[in-house]
Amino acid sequence: SDVVATQSSPTTAWIQRTQLAFGVSAKLELARNVKELPSSDMFGSNSSSTHSTGSLEPTVTLQVRPIMRGAGIGSLVCTHDLLLFVRQPTTIELALRGKAFNAVDTTYEGSVGVGKLGRMGFLGHALNSRNRSIDGLIVRVSKKCWDQFSSLDEVFMIKIGSNITALREFNALSRADKIPLMKYLLDGKAGNKDEITHGSHTSSQFDPLAASSNALPVGFRIFIKSKMNTSQLAAITAAAREYGDGGFTLIKGPPGTGKSTTLVSVLNALHLRQYQAYYAAIERIVTESNPTTHFEELAALNRAAEVKPRILVCAPSNAAIDNVIVKIMSDRFVDGNGAKYSPSIVRVGAGIVNPKVKGVGLKEMVDSIITLGSDVSKLEAIITTGRQELRRIQKEIQKLKIRIQAIVNACPYEIPDCWEIRIDEESFEATGSVLFVNHKSKKTTYDLPMVKRPTERPCQIKKMP
């Protein structure tokens, strides 16, 4: 009563106009052999009418029957909704005015307050959904509260909100020990010893992962180095390095400090990192010396496609996720050569706020495919064009595979790093031979170079353009 009385008058008026107007008189009875309970809720999944939850207060499962057949509360009742049950509507009206505890209810002897009649009402947790009528609605309530109201022929019921947010928080906390990130959250020593923090590197020193085996492409490194400040570069480095090894990166800052721009660059870096894994898988297939059938090669390529970039971006609101998408659409990503490209995006979920995002909405994309499928002639034309393009790409793949294998197998021993192996397109189809280019002496030859000396660095054949 005290809490409700402190609410603003518009809020009180809204409750009186809507929720109270949609209340309904109902009879409650213990539920028997209930089969509509969800598989999991905050109290567990027990379909018996009485349920004890260990250290929690014992509960009972009740079934709601409206006094007036087919009556409802004017809105959908969903699983995990919160329902308030009171003796009669006047109890709520008095509570809204802050007078429930000192008013006299003529229907009952004595005060409506806790003093003589005990509780004025109790809360119920909806375990199933009902649309128009509340008949058959299943709720779980405190057994202690129910004992005080079980003798009533009827109660007044209103919907006061949803318990879904609190339930999610409760379940998350209950399963905190199973969260993979927990070891990183609680153990300050779990991160790298040389963890990059704000201000620890200057812009001139920054070259994220350039020396590691999974370095980001040089074109991307040059681009972000020219566009980002020191703290942004440190954030991108922290998020992108050792990607896939666990852990997390927390980036925070006041409005206008470039967090959204940094986020897009982080996504760009992760996108490139995943594409590098994809390219590496393709390279292993193409440079495989063992001959394979066409179907075996296709199967291997399909397996490699499973590591293509799949990044899930989440935000606390529809507007926030739309802003990220618009930012990616306008700024685009940068590839390994420093050129711009647009990644494939699918906006999942309803509530698109920005009209610019509608084109990548999942529903709109599905509708577009369905519409396209209804036009047979257009569909046949697309299939024909697609098959032609597929044949062209397959021929190109085979052509490149022959050339890559020729480069990889060109020399049986290590050669000095001043050499480079190239393909001469004008003569390769006829001869199948490669060229050896010596950048030190500025000469080109078909002959095999000299063996690498112990003091010389080897030529990285697979790292060549």
Image: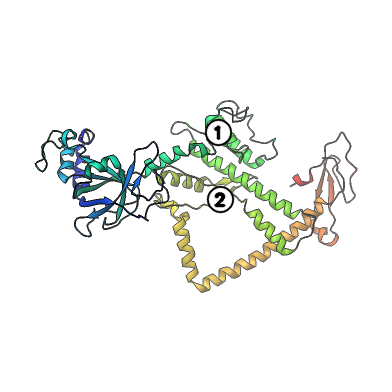
**Displayed quadrant of residue 196:** top right
Q: Residue at x 52, y 45 (%)?
A: 331
Q: Residue at x 50, y 69 (%)?
A: 373
Q: Residue at x 86, y 60 (%)?
A: 431
Instruction: Name the residue at the left extreme.
Output: 106
**Displayed quadrant of residue 268:** top right
Where is residue 203 shown, x and y percent of the image?
Answer: 60, 30
Q: Nearer the viewer, residue 410 or 120?
A: 120
Q: CA distance from mark 2 to mark 1?
A: 33 Å
Image: 318 above or below 6:
below
Mark 2 highlights which residue? 343
Where is residue 337 shown, x and y percent of the image?
Answer: 65, 45
Mark 1 highlights which residue? 183
Q: Is residue 204 toward the left or the right of residue 355 in the image? A: right
* Residue 74 visible in rendering: no
- The image quadrant where one finds the N terminus is top left
